[in-house]
């Protein structure tokens, strides 16, 4: 019996203790209680060397991610002020004009917060695909194995024009793992749930790999946190199983 089929309302809490904790902690991190703040990295800036050098990690985290957060806080503050005013056509137009900044900086904050958790030192226990796990099962089924997955992710991510992200995502509608790309800082939206994200903005690799994107894309798989991917897949399977269960009751 598959993991998803094994899930019932009674077994969710038993099967998903870790996964559910992760959902709660992520919701807390991304909550809108006041100002957004830069999350700490779960490893040192030089921990991903030689695959991603310290200078890249430090700049990427302290400068680039921080800038998205600073700008997001600023635009949300402006929005709050506007929403507190009488909603005249002029006010509404001002609110509308801020939506691109919300999307860009909000997406930048969400995507990078996922990205840091996505990575782990090469050779660590987290850098190994969980044997017999749900991620491995879906990758075998949908890509014929991890090498097939890497090949498709790298090809589609390298083909992005300009800046963006390559993702391994779980499709809640059809239950499959799929490779999707987003431009600029657009986040992954429903029905897809991000499992692994790869930042293909030049700030993520240029200091080390210059313009050779394929070298960066090949190297980053050495520091992908497959344990995190396993947890994200488990959460996705649980949520899909619960949704299907609710749908069947409603029908
Ligand atoms: Fe980035």
Image: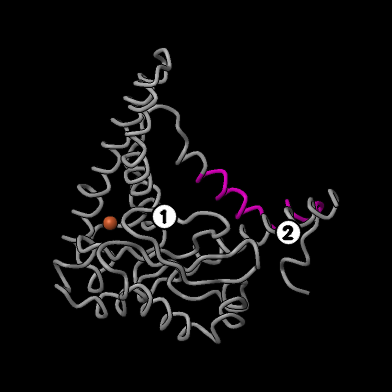
The span picked out in magenta is: 9-26
Q: How is the image coloured?
A: one colour
239 and 86: which is toward the camera: 86
Name the residue carrying label 2: 241
State left or right for residue 79 relative to residue 206.
right
Residue 22 inside the magenta-drawn segment: yes
Relative to 99, is 136 above or below? below
Label annotation for residue 114: 1
* 2 or 1: tag closer to the N-terminus: 1
State left or right for residue 16 relative to residue 76.
right
Q: Quadrant of ligand 1?
A: bottom left
Residue 92 inside the magenta-drawn segment: no
Q: Position of residue 161 (x, y in %)?
A: 27, 68
Q: Secondary structure at mark 1?
A: helix
Q: Position of residue 219 (x, y in %)?
A: 29, 77
State left or right for residue 178 relative to residue 20.
left
């Amino acid at each position: 019996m598959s993991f998803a089929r094994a899930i019932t309302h009674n077994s969710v809490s038993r099967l998903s203790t870790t996964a559910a904790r992760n959902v709660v902690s992520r919701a807390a991190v991304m909550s809108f209680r006041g100002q957004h703040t830069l999350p700490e990295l779960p490893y040192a800036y030089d921990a991903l060397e030689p695959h991603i050098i310290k200078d890249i990690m430090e700049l990427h985290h302290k400068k680039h991610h921080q800038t998205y957060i600073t700008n997001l806080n600023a635009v949300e503050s402006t929005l709050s002020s506007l929403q507190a005013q009488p909603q005249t056509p002029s006010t509404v137009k001002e609110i509308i004009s801020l939506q691109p900044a919300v999307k860009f900086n909000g997406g930048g904050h969400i995507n990078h917060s996922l990205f840091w958790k996505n990575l782990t030192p090469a050779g660590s226990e987290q850098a190994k695909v969980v044997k017999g796990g749900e991620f491995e099962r879906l990758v075998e089924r949908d890509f014929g194995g991890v090498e097939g997955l890497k090949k498709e992710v790298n090809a589609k991510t390298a083909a992005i024009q300009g800046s963006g992200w390559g993702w391994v995502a779980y499709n809640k509608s059809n239950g499959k793992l799929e490779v999707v790309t987003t431009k600029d800082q657009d986040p992954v939206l429903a029905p897809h749930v991000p499992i692994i994200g790869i930042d293909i903005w030049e700030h993520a690799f240029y200091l080390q790999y210059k313009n050779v994107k394929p070298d960066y894309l090949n190297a980053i798989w050495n520091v992908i946190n497959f344990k995190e991917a396993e947890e994200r897949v488990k959460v996705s399977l649980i949520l899909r199983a619960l949704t299907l269960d609710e749908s069947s009751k409603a029908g």
